[in-house]
């Protein structure tokens, strides 16, 4: 991080005030802004373009594994939640509830709700209960299984401390809901999706993650097992980037999802649910951004290459614009990530320096400048967002057209390598309680410096120990890794036997 007094596009710098840097980076990139509705956000076109690319690419991965999209109601009858006690208890404090229809004008000329509903409706915080009601009608026999459905939707979870993309009252997500004939099939589905999420975040967002199982206290309400991926961002905190839940038969019992099995007997289905949200955009910003703005991996950038005409004189403007349009046309015929390149010519009649900095702050992967002298040489000037801002390279137009996909691949790989190195540098194997507390305690308590990271430490499985650490340090178990790479040992807090190390971190 920049610790000098060099002027940067974003103030404050990351090392000065990371939370405020995050808000200013979002504003400078025109990704989103707070809404007049407290806790909600307006996602602006550049931010929504990122989400659309995530949606399109994830959806292709879902379809390739046999899943199909559907849509279910935004409103869920309160009685549906009452069927699954543990589930509703976990979401009760976050629910927004509709109690009336119609507005009427009272004697003072003010609008007021007029007609109470016979049953309150909950605006979906998640859809297990309402989707379960449909599945109960659709599933009659083992021949109807598996049901593999996803929906793209908005959800509402009342948020007291909103932060753009990371925590808002309303946010966008996808939620998959499946029903299976056997427990083993459902568990395999939950793991399949976990692996799919890990691959998507790594290969498309250039973010490495730890994957594994959540501890009992961090489990999704009503689930038997919650699997998750956890990313480390630049203030060394964890962000839960995706979850996949094995629900056992709990929700099937509550919703009445039964089928006639191969022996002719009635049996409850085995279900899963899984989701990723617009929180991924916040993860991207915090992982790849620098003191000049956000930095976008090419695979999810709404525009991968922006062409900036440099035409200070009217007599050369027409020729330069024609050259830029021709370049854009040839680049769009190229493919990256198995889709045509996204190229934009910035035709706005504003200063070149202003244009350039706007695109830097938006994180566009490649900026191209073409001016009169470049045109004389049939050349252009290229700047990559993964390199220092002042770094530029001149090359012939045809050379760039041929190399463009490779350059984008190089940027994508560079961002992943950079993020991986950062995570490894801030992940520590810890062998004692003292070292653990030291790792997660800032030296300056008044104004904490960036500290901590991911700790790999043995734990005896005790919920009491977990709660104590959470109360003392605001540190939680992010995942219990599923692989067998860790040796058994002793819990660093109690000295009792521990089957393996788990991943601890402060989190968002």
Image: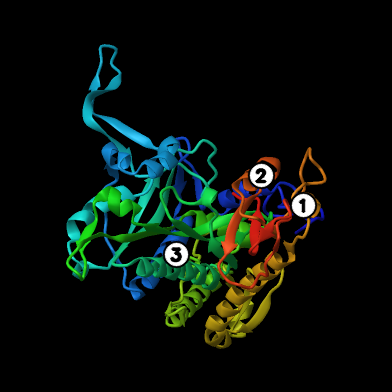
Q: Is residue 353 left or right of residue 179?
A: right
Task: Give how far across and how far down residue 160 sits, in percent.
Answer: 51, 35
> 91 or 376, which lies in front?
91
| Helix, strand or loop at mark 2 | loop
Question: Which residue position is annotated with label 2?
Answer: 474
Q: Say whether residue 422 is left or right of residue 277.
A: right
What residue is shown at x 46% (from left), y 72% (from top)? 342
Q: Which residue is mark 1?
A: 433
Which-is-in-front pick, marks 2 and 1? 1
Residue 491 image position (x, y, % from top left): 70, 56
For residue 139, which quarter of the picture? bottom left
Q: How many marks?
A: 3
Q: Residues within 10 Å of mark 2 (few under 14, many from 20)?
A: few
Q: Residue at x 18, y 65 (%)?
A: 141
Near-viewer residue (179 or 59): 179
- The label number, if any, that marks residue 54 in the structure image: 3
């Amino acid at each position: 991080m920049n610790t000098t007094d060099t002027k940067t596009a974003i103030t404050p710098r990351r090392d000065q005030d990371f939370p405020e840097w995050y808000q200013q980076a979002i504003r400078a990139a025109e990704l989103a802004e707070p809404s007049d509705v407290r806790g909600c956000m307006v996602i602006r076109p550049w931010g929504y373009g990122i989400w659309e690319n995530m949606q399109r690419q994830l959806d292709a991965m879902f379809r390739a594994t046999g899943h199909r999209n559907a849509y279910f109601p935004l409103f869920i009858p309160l009685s549906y939640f009452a069927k699954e006690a543990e589930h509703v208890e976990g979401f009760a404090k976050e629910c927004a509830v509709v109690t009336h229809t119609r507005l009427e004008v009272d004697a003072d000329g003010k609008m007021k709700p007029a007609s109470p509903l016979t049953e309150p409706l909950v605006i979906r915080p998640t859809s297990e209960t309402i989707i379960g009601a449909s599945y109960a009608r659709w599933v009659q026999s083992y021949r109807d299984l598996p049901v593999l459905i996803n929906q793209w939707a908005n959800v509402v979870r009342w948020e007291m401390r909103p932060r753009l993309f990371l925590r808002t009252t309303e946010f966008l997500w996808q939620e998959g809901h499946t029903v299976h004939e056997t427990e083993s099939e459902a568990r395999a589905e939950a793991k399949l999706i976990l692996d799919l999420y890990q691959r998507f975040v790594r290969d498309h967002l250039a973010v490495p993650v730890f994957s594994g199982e959540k501890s009992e206290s961090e489990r999704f309400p009503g689930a038997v097992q919650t699997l998750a991926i956890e990313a480390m961002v630049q203030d060394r905190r964890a962000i839960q980037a995706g979850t996949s839940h094995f629900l056992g038969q709990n929700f099937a019992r509550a919703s009445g999802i039964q089928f006639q099995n191969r022996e002719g007997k009635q049996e409850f289905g085995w279900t899963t649910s899984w989701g990723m949200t617009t929180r991924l955009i916040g993860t991207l910003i915090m992982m790849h951004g620098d003191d000049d703005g956000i930095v976008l991996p090419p695979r999810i950038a709404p525009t991968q290459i922006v062409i900036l005409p440099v035409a200070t004189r009217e007599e050369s403007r027409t020729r330069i614009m024609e050259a830029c349009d021709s370049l854009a046309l040839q680049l769009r015929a190229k493919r990256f990530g198995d889709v045509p390149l996204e190229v934009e010519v910035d035709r706005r009649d504003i200063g070149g320096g202003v244009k350039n900095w706007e695109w830097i702050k938006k994180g566009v992967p490649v900026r191209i400048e073409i001016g009169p002298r470049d045109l004389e040489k049939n050349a252009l000037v290229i700047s990559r967002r993964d390199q220092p801002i002042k770094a530029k390279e001149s090359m012939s137009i045809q050379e760039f057209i041929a190399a463009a996909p490779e350059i984008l691949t190089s940027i994508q790989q560079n961002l992943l390598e950079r993020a991986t190195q950062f995570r490894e540098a801030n992940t520590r194997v810890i062998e004692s309680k003292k070292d653990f507390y030291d790792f997660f305690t800032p030296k300056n308590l008044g104004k904490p410096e960036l500290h901590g990271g991911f700790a790999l430490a043995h734990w005896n499985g005790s919920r009491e120990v977990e709660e104590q650490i959470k109360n003392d340090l605001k540190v939680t178990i992010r995942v219990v890794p599923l692989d067998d790479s860790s040796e058994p040992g002793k819990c660093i807090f109690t000295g009792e036997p521990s089957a393996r190390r788990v991943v601890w971190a402060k989190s968002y």
